[in-house]
Image (cartoon, helix red, strand yellow):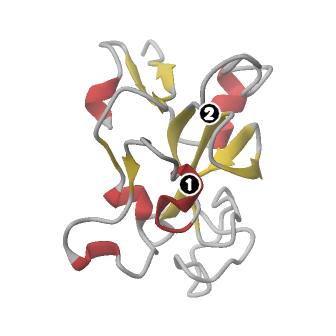
Amino acid sequence: MADLCAVGWHVCTSDAEVAARSPTGCEGATRPTDNPLFFATRQSTNGCAVCANGTSTGPECDSASCSEGCQQTALTSNDFFGCGNFGAEATCGPLNQFSENLCSGLASVGSPWSCDAATDADDNGLCEAYTVTKTGSKFGGVLCCRDLND
């Protein structure tokens, strides 16, 4: 996803970053007349649409636990959140949509979103944040945040 934002921008990493950069959150990402659109961030979950935005890294924090309070790590890569009018409805700070199991929330006729890798890398549906692909320009993209000046 890193190549999808212009120089000086990056894919937004978390619900906290979106909240800090956009006082209105996902408001304005789509209009009522827009076709289905989903703009992905790097914010993941540990299952059950529970946003991994806490501080815990204990053994209960894996991609299948559905535990609240887990930190976003490589172990909490189940699904991903974003903004738009397309996807499974969610509440993760300002982020209002998410991918759901194997991107089923983004499944629609003609949708280029996929989380089921051609290998068995994610047949269990627990690491969509790493296996997501998008093969066309319709149905959205990524949410880009401006890099901070150092």
State which tag comes first along the sequence, 2 or 1.
2
Q: Is 2 positioned to the left or the right of 95 in the image?
A: left
Q: Could you tell me the amino acid type at mark 1?
A: Ser
Q: Residue at x 75, y 52 (%)?
A: 90
Q: Residue at x 42, y 62 (%)?
A: 128
What residue is at 66 percent from the left and 21 percent from the top?
A: 29
Q: On the image, numbered disc 1 is attached to which residue?
A: 99
Residue 72 visible at all: no
Q: Which residue is mark 2?
A: 17
- The quadrant holding residue 70 is bottom right
- Residue mark closest to the camera, 2 vs 1: 1
Q: 54 or 78: which is nearer to us?
A: 78
Callout 1 crowding tier (Cα within 10 Å): few <14, some 14–19, many ≥20: many
* Observer able to see residue 107: yes
Label 2 crowd (10 A; few <14 / some 14-19 / many >=20): some
x and y, in percent, of residue 100 in the image = 59, 62
- Where 104 sits versus 37, above or below? below
Q: Which residue is more in the foreground, 123 or 8?
A: 123
Dot 1 lies on which element?
Answer: loop
Classify residue 26 as left or right of residue 2: right
> Where in the figure is residue 41, as x and y percent of width and height?
51, 40
Quick one: quadrant of the C terminus? Answer: top left
Secondary structure beneath dot 2 equals helix
Q: CA distance from mark 2 to mark 1?
A: 19 Å
